[in-house]
Amino acid sequence: MLRICTRTMVNVGMLYPYGLVKSCHLVKSVSASLVTGRYFTHQTGLPSLPVPPLQQTCEYYLSLLEPIVEMEELKRTKELVEEFQKAGGVGERLQRSLEMKARNTDNWSTGYALHYDYDSNRVPLVVHSNVGAVFPQMDFKDKDGQTRCAARMIAAVLDFKTMIDNETLPVEYMGGKPMCMKQYSQMLSSCRIPGLEKDSLVFHGKSSNPPKHITVVHNSQFFVLDVYNSDGTPLTVDQLYVQLERICNSSPEINAEPVGILTTLDRNSWSKAYISLIKDKINKDSLSTIERSICTVCLDGPIPQASDEMYNTYAGLQIMHGGGSQWNSANRWFDKTLQLIIGEEGAQGFNMSHSAADGTVFMVLADYVIASMKKPEKILSPVVPLPKPQKLHFNITPDIKKYIEEAKQSMDIIAQNLDLRVMVFSHYGKKVLKDHKISPDAFIQMAIQLAYYRMYQRCCPSYEAASLRTFRDGRVAAIYSTTSASAAFVKAFDDPKKKNTEKVDLLEKAMKVHRWNTGMAISGQEVEGHLIGLSMLAAEEEISMPDVFTDISFHKFLDYRLSTSQVTSKSGCLPCAGPALLESYDMCYSLTNVDITFVVTAYHTCKENNAAQLIQVLENALLDMRALLAQSPRTN
């Protein structure tokens, strides 16, 4: 659920299409406005996330099941829901407990969501959990250009860090409401630590002795680089360039065990290897240095040559996983919240741990870094001598060596399995849709629904991520994209018996429902989060799990086959995320006035899925829906 999320703005508006409540909000996708100010002054005034009424969630849940479950399954689920919410029943008991929890915590949902999606999830972080941001291609093709680019990128991150530390980062607003800024203080100087049963997140930025160093990895060898002068000022670009050059000269080839590859293991295996590693003091100190660092900078080796047209695809794969054990996958520390990745051939971007912050927060940093790197370099005084960056050492036992070999094999399988496709849809963008007085995001969501239906002749559980940051400590909500209204639209679209006016009417109804669902999600009335919270409370209180949560319909409800996110970047940065499930697709998209860019991922081992085909079918759906609008007098 906590995937890269879109931002939305609330306006007053329409009637609820399912008839559960009398009024709601119209929503349209916008960029958050920025207002300068000390952002922690806004935090205490932010509202807590509400607990939705139990009856509302139950009725909303049943309506969302209609297009994805069989009639007999829905009938059975209605009986279970009725039993669950009856007066004096287990549903009311859990609801009271959840309401009490909400009164005593900043955000009742965030802890559950992190536990459900991340901390207790034992899949590898690489591809399955971490997300990526691909920067526009830089014009360099050699080691010197790579090192200079890395120095400028680090300097920009340190400038951004100063704003975080001084609380001068502009406060973000959505629909006139201030947004929670806490995630910015978590994105640097933080790390995920593997555990035997669940992982933990550690944050060092606000400690009594906050870190002043970054870690740099080159040829799979790790170095500690102090990035502040003795007077507390950050190193200049020229100083950073000299230090990075010294690191590269100290690690000319891969001649050490690739310890970084261990962070690509599943979390159970990595936690066992981690316990073995820290038995040795040198290893423990080296791991602590990496974990405490502000961020990790990955100076990658060459990758297979690709044409300029294929840059986004090849760069996306490098940012997501590094290409495998023979390329750059060991040149990483995937547990770090932020990794800056710079390749020799001009590929660059971020790899980001999603457990600490949402994708849109990292995208703000990415836009800042890219804008900073475009500015002319300042001419500064000669570089004063600096202490040589120190290499981090590891003592590798036969046991650890075995884990490293296991990690190489599993990483290569992960790299080979990920199918990533990029499409720039240049036929039109959000301007055309706004000219038709249509919500661009709702229109794109219906195009995605139509594309999937055309490929598979069925509707599937799907969601779009939305921000909950107008609430204290808010993260992400799921907007359920598949509804009875969207199902009616996609089933009618290619039916020759249906008139165009009827198809347009169905499209408008489907978009209206999607916008209503968006309003419900961002106002804290989300179904998924509420039901998961109730089920986890049942486990906490050690009561028998209610049948509604073991029901096949609940499993199908959460078995998303399409995970989507709208992420807009001012700098042309492309968001990437791997599918959460073997059988699912992940789709990130960004809009400009004239085009729409899609990044779609799937797994090759799922023979039913085909990212290249979905991209093509989606392009056709967008063209056909535009043609439908052009033929309709109501939208002209």
Image (tube, rainbow, N blue to C red):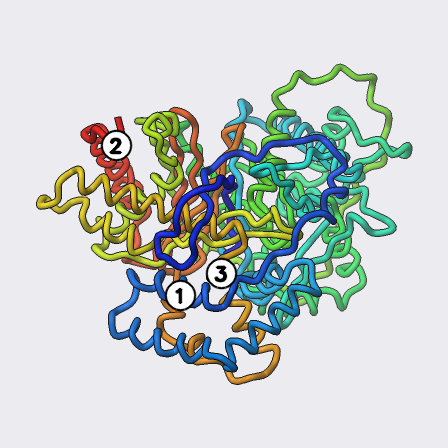
Q: With respect to residue 482, does 219 lie above or below?
A: above
* Picture disc at residue 59: 1
* Label 1 Cα crowd, 10 Å radius (few <14 / some 14-19 / many 20+): some
Secondary element at image label 3? helix
The answer to whether 12 appears left or right of 483 in the picture is: right
In which quadrant of the rendered view does residue 609 lie?
bottom left
Say whether marks 2 and 1 touch (CB < 8 Å): no
The numbered dot on residue 410 is 3
Secondary structure beneath disc 2? helix
Q: Residue at x 38, y 32 (%)?
A: 596
Distance from label 2 to label 3 (Cα)?
Answer: 44 Å
For label 2, the residue is 626
In this rendering, the label closer to the viewer, 3 or 1: 1
Residue 535 position within the rendered picture, expressed as x and y whole percent measured from the top left = 52, 73
Residue 401 appears left or right of 613: right
In the displayed structure, would residue 7 be above or below residue 197? above
Q: Residue at x 86, y 25 (%)?
A: 384
Res. 20 image quadrant: bottom left
Rounded to the nearest angstrom, the CA distance separating label 2 from label 1 is 34 Å
For this rendering, which residue is in front, 267 or 164?
164
